[in-house]
Image: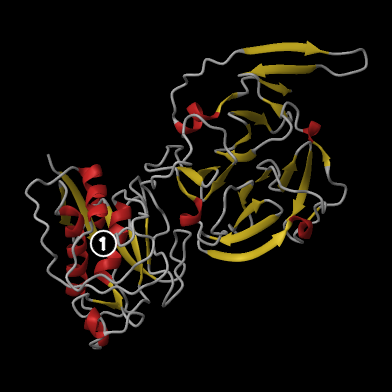
């Protein structure tokens, strides 16, 4: 049984030949043809059937746009060179859409042999790569594959590499009548840095964490989506809290400005005043604009934190007052975003956040509620009463990642008090001790 996918080219580059009269610019028909050929790359070997909608793009599964600079999705283009395009994985809203930088010197790939590699960009190869992501394919680590994170020069007669064939057939079935004939138009793409910013189908790595059986290094709400980090990988939940398909994905293939050898993320948050994203890794912090522009790198001590502090456990903007808070072990700081320095009279003891355990892994606000995370569990926090809610803690994986609750945890509470001390609840959960 075949699967149908509707696509539509909603916007075109400003420099169409019909408008400029320049022979170097593509016509509307040529752009339509390049995109159609790119869909055939994936449709021929699989059970996918593509149909173009010319007049009702809102009904399409994949909407293609040519944009420039900031264009409303949080991932601005940078003009000629570097970032050519990006795609969003299958899902609601913007999911499945493909954006091209209209300032790039796009060319039909049948003409690409007449240009130097860096002078013109093959629209066909770029579109085929991005459509792979829009359909649910991740970057491949197989050299020479179309879904490799780096574009390479292909032969003038393009054939879809075997690794890509297996990938699309795994997702959409096998077309038994498919013959591995070349595509009708030659292609010679430039060798450029990665162009896809949102990978999906995970590479075969032995260190990939089990989504449902692990603790998590850091969690944060970024662009109204929940990002969950573990080791070299991360998951994404959409704005409705649904786990996006194809995760976990590798951090350094999506957040391309972080160190290439990144092994984990200690803490991360989105700044309220400008939307930039701050990562804490060891004793350093990284300020990123989107996922491919690095604005600043510094050390924790540059923020006014102790010189001997090795790492930050958690960072978030508290919804109660809109201020930024940093946590490490048993202490916390309030951070002044205006002067980029922790405030005076800090650090303070974590005891203020009643019921929240020490050495937390993360904290964030989602849909108006504050959450703290440690190990495999999380706590809901009452911002007005300044204490955890009675139903806390709960297991993270079943609630946030939709995993089955197979653990049947054993909970035991004891009240510990002395004549001159407040009541303390000691909870044993899955063999771990929490003082609340």
Q: Quadrant of residue 387?
A: top right
Does residue 282 lie above or below 372 as drawn? below
Horizontal and vertical percent position of residue 29: 17, 73
Give residue 46's position: percent from left, percent from top.
16, 48
Q: Secondary structure at mark 1?
A: helix
Say if 54 sits above or below 415 in the image: below
Q: Residue furthest left?
A: 177
- Give the left or right position of residue 396, taking residue 77 as reference: right
Q: Is residue 278 left or right of residue 328?
A: left
Front in this rendered view, residue 320 or 211: 211
The residue nearer to you, when weighing 241 against 403, is 403
Please report the residue visible at 78 percent of the width from the left and 49 percent of the height from the top.
Answer: 309
Q: Would you identify the image quadrant in which residue 386 lies?
A: top right
Q: Quadrant of the N terminus?
A: top left
> Residue most toward the right?
420
Q: How many numbered marks have been drawn onto this rendered protein structure? A: 1
Q: How is the image coloured?
A: secondary structure
Q: Residue at x 32, y 52 (%)?
A: 96
Category of crowding for the residue at label 1, using alpha-carbon neighbours closer than 10 angstroms: few (below 14), some (14–19), many (at least 20): many
Residue at 28% from the left image edge and 64% from the top image edge: 127
Relative to 44, residue 411 above or below: above
> Is residue 32 toward the left or the right of residue 141 in the image?
left
- Residue 63 is situated, as x and y percent measured from the top left of the image, at 29, 57
Q: Which residue is mark 1?
A: 128
- Quarter of the rendering containing residue 242: top left
Q: Position of residue 214 (x, y in %)?
A: 53, 32
In this orientation, which residue lies closer to the viewer: 124 or 202?
202
Give whichever of 343, 87 is nearer the camera.
Answer: 87
């Amino acid at each position: 049984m075949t699967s149908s996918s509707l696509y539509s080219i909603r916007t075109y580059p400003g420099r169409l030949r019909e408008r400029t009269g320049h022979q170097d610019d593509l016509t509307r028909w040529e752009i339509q043809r390049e995109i159609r050929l790119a869909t055939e790359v994936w449709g021929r070997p699989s059970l996918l059937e593509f149909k173009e909608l010319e007049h009702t793009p809102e009904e399409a599964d994949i909407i293609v746009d040519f944009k420039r600079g900031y264009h409303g999705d949080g991932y601005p283009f940078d003009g000629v060179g570097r970032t050519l395009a990006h795609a969003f994985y299958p899902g609601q809203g913007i999911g499945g859409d493909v954006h091209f930088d209209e300032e790039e010197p796009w060319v039909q790939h049948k003409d690409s042999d007449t240009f130097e590699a860096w002078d013109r960009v093959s629209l066909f190869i770029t579109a085929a790569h991005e459509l792979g992501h829009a359909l649910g394919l991740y970057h491949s680590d197989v050299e020479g594959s179309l879904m490799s994170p780096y574009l390479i020069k292909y032969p003038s007669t393009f054939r879809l590499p075997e690794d890509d064939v297996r990938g699309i057939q795994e997702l959409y079935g096998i077309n038994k009548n498919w013959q591995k004939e070349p595509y009708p138009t030659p292609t010679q793409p430039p060798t450029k840095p990665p162009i896809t910013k949102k990978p999906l189908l995970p590479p075969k790595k032995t260190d990939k964490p089990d989504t449902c059986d692990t603790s998590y290094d850091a969690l944060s709400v970024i662009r109204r989506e929940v990002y969950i980090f573990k080791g070299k990988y991360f998951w994404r939940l959409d704005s409705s809290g649904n786990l996006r398909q194809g995760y976990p994905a590798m951090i350094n293939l999506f957040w391309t400005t972080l160190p290439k050898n990144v092994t984990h993320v200690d803490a991360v948050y989105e700044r309220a005043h400008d939307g930039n994203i701050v990562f804490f890794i060891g004793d350093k912090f990284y300020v990123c604009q989107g996922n491919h522009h690095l604005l600043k790198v510094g050390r924790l001590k540059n923020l006014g934190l102790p010189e001997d502090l090795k790492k930050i456990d958690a960072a978030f903007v508290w919804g109660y007052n809109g201020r930024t808070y940093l946590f490490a072990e048993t202490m916390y700081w309030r951070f002044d975003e205006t002067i980029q320095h922790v405030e005076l009279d800090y650090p303070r003891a974590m005891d203020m956040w009643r019921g929240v355990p020490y050495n937390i892994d993360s904290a964030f606000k989602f849909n108006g509620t504050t959450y703290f995370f440690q190990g495999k569990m999380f706590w809901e926090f009452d911002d007005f009463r300044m204490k955890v809610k009675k139903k806390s803690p709960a297991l993270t994986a079943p609630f946030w990642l939709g995993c089955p609750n197979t653990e049947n945890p054993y909970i035991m509470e004891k009240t510990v008090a002395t004549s001159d001390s407040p009541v303390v609840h000691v909870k044993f959960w899955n063999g771990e001790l929490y003082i609340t």
